[in-house]
Amino acid sequence: MLMNKFNWQQLGDLFKHNLKDNNRYAAWRLASIGTMGILSLTIILTIYFIYDNIYNTLSNGNAIIILSNSPLSDTIDVEAYEKVKKIITKKQQTNSIPTKLRNIFYYGQEPPKPIAPDGKK
């Protein structure tokens, strides 16, 4: 019922009148709207960042408290322990070098005989 009496022409004339009279301030209006938008977005993102980090910190602190208070038992692999113990004791033993070593570069007076195809020397 209200729409029947509303004249679209009047609305168009109103916009034209505002743009015509205030054209020199249009750039300032757009700049202020952009600045306010950027400030609003910055404030919203800052609030979200603070909110998210506070709750992450609280949940991590809660997990640390729970884990530090619960008794944990570590299982020990006894077989691996025994193997390592044997290897360490074996490594600590010193090996003596025999005094009479064979010189691998000296074969004596006669050269070694080749092995026959039937496996006999």
Image (tube, rainbow, N blue to C red):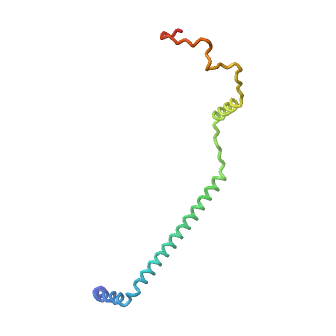
Image quarter for residue 108?
Answer: top right
Quadrant assignment for the C terminus? top right
Image quarter for residue 25?
Answer: bottom left
Q: How many marks?
A: 0
Residue lying at 65% horizontally and 44% vertically, measured from the top left: 73
Residue lying at 63% horizontally and 34% vertically, measured from the top left: 80
Quadrant assignment for the N terminus? bottom left
Task: Return the x and y of residue 38 as percentages of the image width and height.
Answer: 47, 75
Q: Classify 53 as above or below 79.
A: below
Query: Horizontal placement of 72 versus 41: left or right?
Result: right
Q: Classify 100 as above or below 21.
A: above
Q: Classify 114 as above or below 57.
A: above
Q: Classify 9 as above or below 55.
A: below
Task: Return the x and y of residue 69 as percentages of the image width and height.
Answer: 66, 53
Residue lying at 57% horizontally and 13% vertically, measured from the top left: 111
Task: Return the x and y of residue 62 as percentages of the image width and height.
Answer: 62, 58
Residue lying at 63% horizontally and 33% vertically, measured from the top left: 79
Report the front residue among 103 and 9: 103
